[in-house]
Image (tube, rainbow, N blue to C red):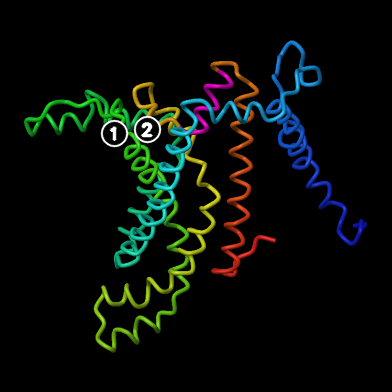
């Protein structure tokens, strides 16, 4: 096999389809960012539309919806980050304490399944549970209560979004912690048991310290997703009655761009989110290197 620049040529050929896909669908569409600085007119195109500079960004923050949307995005995203870190950690620790391998595998399989379902299917299940005629209201009526419109209640919509996301992902997210637990030195457990430690002491003094680096790493890396609250989930679950607490930046951009045809304003909002996310990702990787000695490149 001939070599090209010290690397075998077939490696370049294997990379070619992926590079073509990257250029066509990731690099070329980025020229559309220009719309954020224009009063875009589809009839005139990108080259002849009026140039307005930062006017779209200024107008975006003058809208009454912009600040509540940013607050909703931040609260929902942070809630997901925190609980998607804690719940899988607790689940992995408890699962690790099971002695029956058959039961452990059965539990793992059951909790993994929701991860492989799309939010279109999951939304149907969630509405089936929290809808007016759903399971939750059946229980409420059984105890003498009155049925509630859970999915139209702005006061609990964020909790439903965060809770259902954790339900969908905690089994899959626990894989990382279970993998980390396989690297714990069993001699530490034996030594602690000889010293009289019970199972809770073993968890506190051996298991949790062994997982601390993984927890710090995942927590730091998740900072880059502070503005990613989950378009698919919210779009399939929300309705106009819960916009005040459930409308996030991605769904707002979708309505601006595709429903209200405000292409320039939607592009400005999307670009704003991308810039902030890029800064957060850079900061998170720097923190990951400092506190967990983690580097990608």
> Badge 2 is on which residue?
245
Give me the residue at 47% from left, 60% from top: 176
**x%, y% of residue 196?**
24, 86
Mark with earlier residue (1, 2): 1
Report which quarter residue 32 is drawn in: top right
Label 2 SS: helix
- Indicate left or right for 212 with 15 as reference: left
Give me the residue at 10% from left, 30% from top: 145
- Indicate left or right for 29 with 75 as reference: right
**x%, y% of residue 16?**
81, 43
Give me the residue at 31% from left, 28% from top: 127
Foreground of the two, 232 or 239: 239
**x%, y% of residue 62?**
53, 27
CB under 8 Å between discs 1 and 2? yes
Magenta segment main secondary structure: helix
> Badge 1 is on which residue?
155
Label 1 SS: helix
**Part of the protein shown in magenta:** 248-258
Badge count: 2
């Amino acid at each position: 096999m001939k070599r090209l620049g010290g690397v075998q040529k077939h490696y370049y050929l294997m990379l070619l389809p992926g590079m073509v896909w990257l250029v066509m669908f990731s690099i070329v569409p980025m020229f559309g960012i220009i719309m954020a600085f224009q009063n875009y007119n589809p009839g005139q195109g990108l080259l002849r539309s009026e140039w307005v500079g930062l006017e779209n960004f200024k107008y975006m923050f003058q809208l009454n919806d912009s600040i509540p949307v940013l607050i909703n995005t931040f609260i929902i995203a942070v809630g997901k980050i925190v609980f998607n870190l804690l719940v899988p950690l607790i689940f992995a620790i408890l699962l690790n304490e099971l002695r029956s391998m058959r039961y452990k595998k059965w539990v793992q399989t059951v909790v993994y399944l929701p991860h492989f379902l799309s939010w279109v299917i999951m939304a149907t299940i969630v509405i089936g549970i929290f809808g007016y005629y759903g399971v939750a209201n059946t229980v409420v009526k059984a105890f003498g209560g009155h049925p509630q419109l859970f999915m139209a209640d702005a006061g609990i919509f964020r909790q439903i979004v965060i809770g259902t996301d954790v339900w969908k992902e905690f089994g899959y997210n626990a894989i990382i912690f279970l993998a980390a637990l396989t690297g714990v030195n069993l001699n530490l457990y034996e030594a602690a048991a000889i010293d009289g430690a019970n199972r809770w002491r073993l968890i506190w003094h051996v298991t949790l310290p062994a997982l601390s680096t993984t927890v710090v790493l995942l927590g730091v890396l998740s900072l880059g997703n502070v503005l990613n609250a989950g378009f698919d989930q919210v779009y399939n679950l929300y309705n106009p009655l819960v916009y005040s607490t459930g409308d996030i930046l991605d769904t707002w951009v979708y309505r601006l761009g595709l429903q209200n045809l405000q292409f320039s304003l939607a592009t400005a909002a999307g670009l704003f989110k991308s810039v902030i996310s890029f800064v957060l990702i850079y900061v998170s990787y720097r923190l990951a290197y400092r506190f967990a000695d983690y580097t990608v490149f």
